[in-house]
Image: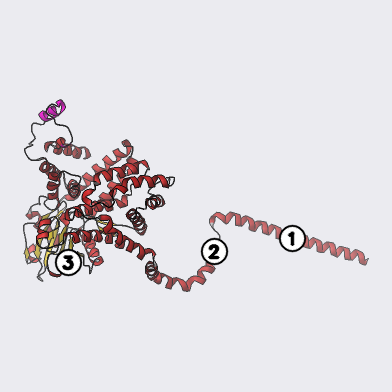
Amino acid sequence: MRLLRLAKIARVGLSHGLDQLILDHDPTNLPARLVGAALFWRNLSAPRAERLRRALESLGPIFVKFGQVLSTRRDLLPPDIAEELAKLQDQVPPFPSALAIAELEHAYGKPVGEVFTSFDIEPVASASVAQVHFATLPDGREVAVKILRPGIAPIIDHDIALLDALAALLERLWSDGKRLKPREVVAEFAKHLHDELDLMREAANCSQLRRNFTPSPLLRVPEVCWDWCTSSVMVMERMHGLPISQVDRLRDVGVDLKKLSRAGVEIFFTQVFRDGFFHADMHPGNILVATDGENFGKYVALDFGIMGTLNEVDKNYLAINFLAFFRRDYHRVAEAHIESGWAPKETRVDELEAAVRAVCEPIFDRPLKGISFGKVLLRLFQTSRRFNVEIQPQLVLLQKTLLNVEGLGRQLDPDLDLWQTAKPFLERWMVEQIGWRGLLKHLRQEAPQWATLLPRLPRLAHQALAAPPHAALASEVSALREEQARQRRRLTWLVVLLAVQTALAVVLLIH
């Protein structure tokens, strides 16, 4: 199956002329002319960007998601390709409405007309693993109905198997393979991709994010209609707003784009560091901007299939690294990498500090439009390879999301200073974590445990003192006890012998 899938990828790529994006097709180049002549059956009349988009759509959801991520990096792509790939965010060809109706009737066990008072046959949005229809519930609420693509699971399984095989090959043949852990990265991606196939899980993610940001002046999250949710159907409150990618329309209705870009950065850092639970698929197709009344100018989050989580250790080290970067404290950055185990313990701090400084110092005090992130990422990769810094699979989603946030910030406000926007938030968070507020917060969190533990301390201390010694010392303790017993027996015999000798001496003296 993997070989067949690989053959399909090659066939689709050649049929859409993607080799022209890689190979030199100068008419004077003989190999290029031979390739072009051999593939007489392909049609190259469409623009290259359109051919790339169609190829990704033909290859399925994993490749569509790859195109979605690329579409947010306009600083790394030619304008025509970036514009075309942006259509993958919510304009993937939908599956037939008849299949959508059949899936709903299978999920509910009754006709759609008995579940919804109205149901729009035409989907309003179509993505890589599901599509969305608008409907109305019997109580009058307007809702969005998300329906899983029929037969999508086997396709994803095949693509994941192919990616895993390619990752294993990279680990063996590429000098950086083991350090970059491609198989672990694929496994992490596969886990989250499979999570998207369970819409009950997505509904739970949506509910959790809504609870985290209720109330919030920055972000709106739809309410889940649990009575109508199944593993293949999710029903939630219908949200109104303009797509965040429609910058001109947002400007025309009076949205402050500079404020909106700063709010996006704050939302991201709040999710990561306050909650450790963040929306990890923040491409423009999943973000609206509210334009109604009291919600005017707020972000509206959609599509909660991929959510990232961080534990306290990751959050603390990330905060230390971010804050040290913003303060240009490269020595602390190097120390944090070594303390966390991201860099080998034998790494010299001063050498890693100098390397990080050389990469990061040129980009400070410059707006996003003045920074070539492609060059920055390339130099960071070279630095990490030199110092054997290991890729952290649990942070892959965070890295992807940060790229999305940067891409959104560039579209809304090219002059956004990401560092100055994020620095006050991180400083405030660090104070709350390690200052007196953090102390009070942790005391409140631990209070129930202390209330249970304190009355038991005397008994636990007595049990600890009376408990048998550690297994590693048991044999030594046993030997000591046997020696003590032998010494007591010898002393007893000596006392007895002395007593007998004393008695004999007394008898002899009497006689």
428 or 269, nearer to the observer? 428
Q: Is residue 468 magenta?
A: no
Q: Are marks 3 and 1 in contact (CB under 8 Å)?
A: no
47 above or below 342? above
Q: Are marks 2 and 3 in contact (CB under 8 Å)?
A: no
Residue tagged by mark 2?
467
Residue tagged by mark 3?
225
Q: Residue at x 40, y 69 (%)?
A: 443
Residue 256 sits in quarter? bottom left
Quarter holding the N terminus? top left
Tell me if 320 is positioned left or right of 148 in this view: right
* Pair 3/1: label in front: 3
Q: Residue at x 8, y 35 (%)?
A: 42
Q: Three-letter amino acid code at disc 2?
A: Ala
Disc with the residue nearer the chain's start (2 vs 3): 3
Tell me if 251 is positioned left or right of 157 in this view: left
Tell me which colouring the rendered structure shows: secondary structure
* Pair 2/3: label in front: 3
Disc with the residue nearer the chain's start (3 vs 1): 3
Q: Which residues are magenta?
A: 21-41
Disc with the residue nearer the chain's start (1 vs 2): 2
Q: How many marks?
A: 3
Q: Three-letter amino acid code at disc 3?
A: Cys
Tell me if 44 is positioned left or right of 486 in this view: left
Q: Is residue 35 magenta?
A: yes
Residue tagged by mark 1?
491
Residue 309 sits in quarter? bottom left
Q: The residue tagged with tag 1: helix, strand or loop?
A: helix
